[in-house]
Image (tube, rainbow, N blue to C red):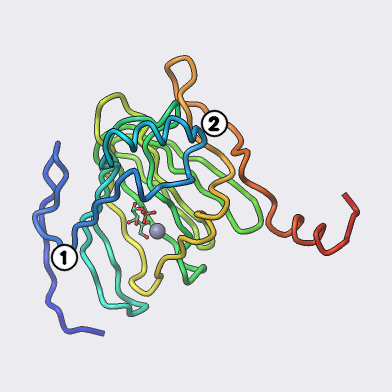
Amino acid sequence: MTDDPPFGFDVRLPGGIPARYDNHIQRRLSALRGQYSDQQAYDAMLALEDTLLYEVYEIRRPPHGGDLSHGVSIVHPGKVGDEYFMTKGHYHAVLDTAEVYYCLRGMGMMVMETPVGDWAVEEMAPGRVVFVPPRWAHRSVNVGRGEDLVMLYVYPADAGHDYGTIESRGFRKLVVERDGKPALIDNPRWAWPDRRSSQQAGGGQG
Ligand code: F6R
Ligand code: ZN
């Protein structure tokens, strides 16, 4: 609990950089090693430049259950092969914590899934809100043509982040460009977490 006074700040468009923030994160291509399906395209792009994929302007709050961390995420436009620029994606370390996103600018997809393999994708466009329920991993994908995807987010300050699960197998669905439009395809690297381990344990029931 803190005794901070209330505050307000502007998020002006088109830039979307909040007038107040505590921390600025920049994530580059090298931070998404292993996440893009076209490894050749990834290596070729990285050899040229460690391109800036997205930025987060954080209004950090102390990790107290009643407090709310918030900020603005900006995913830049582009593709690695035919797969759009995207965030790493994560579960919250405290799995039972939700998040709300409000799209201010651009076109995007929020790709989500649960530890038991349920998945969902919600479109993002200016004025649209996406609710990420407790237990759902989430990744933002910019599917716009040449325009930043700018979103305000809010989540419990004690949620924390678990990146490891997504790093190891990715999301179940990938967002790629097909015939000039975004399309969902299965991620070949993804595997049923529980079934595979039970098969390895000798279950053999298919
Ligand atoms: C916080 C949250 C967003 C993301 C941001 C960057 O819980 O979901 O602020 O942190 O969109 O994505 P990641 O953290 O996956 O690199
Ligand atoms: Zn989150």
The one nearer the camera, 100 or 74, is 74
- Tag on residue 60? none
Q: Is residue 63 above or below residue 199?
A: below
Q: Is residue 170 above or below residue 92?
A: above
Q: Earlier in the sequence, mark 1 or mark 2?
A: 1
Instruction: Tell whether circle 1 marks a residue whose Cβ is less than 8 angstroms from ligand 1.
Output: no
Distance between the alpha carbons at the discs numbered 1 and 2: 35 Å
- Tag on residue 184? 2
Q: Residues within 10 Å of mark 2 (few under 14, many from 20)?
A: some
The one nearer the camera, 17 or 40, is 40
Residue 136: x, y in percent?
52, 56
Residue 179: x, y in percent?
47, 14
Determine the quadrant in which ligand 1 lies. bottom left
Q: Quadrant of residue 13?
A: top left
Residue 74: x, y in percent?
25, 44
> In the current view of this chain or complex, which residue is farthest to the right?
205
Name the secondary structure under disc 2.
Answer: strand
Q: As drawn, is 87 to the left or to the right of 174?
A: left
At 61% from the left and 59% from the top, the residue drawn is 115
Name the secondary structure under disc 1.
Answer: loop
Q: Tags 1 and 2 in contact by the CB under 8 Å rule?
A: no
Instruction: Tell whether circle 2 marks a residue whose Cβ is less than 8 angstroms from ligand 1.
Output: no
Q: How many marks?
A: 2
Q: Amino acid at mark 1?
A: Asp
At 23% from the left and 68% from the top, the residue drawn is 60
Q: As drawn, is 30 to the left or to the right of 177?
A: left
Q: Is residue 84 above or below residue 4?
A: above
At 21% from the left and 64% from the top, the residue drawn is 59
Q: Residues within 10 Å of mark 1 (few under 14, many from 20)?
A: few
Q: Amino acid at mark 2?
A: Leu
Residue 107: x, y in percent?
33, 32
> Which residue position holds label 1?
22
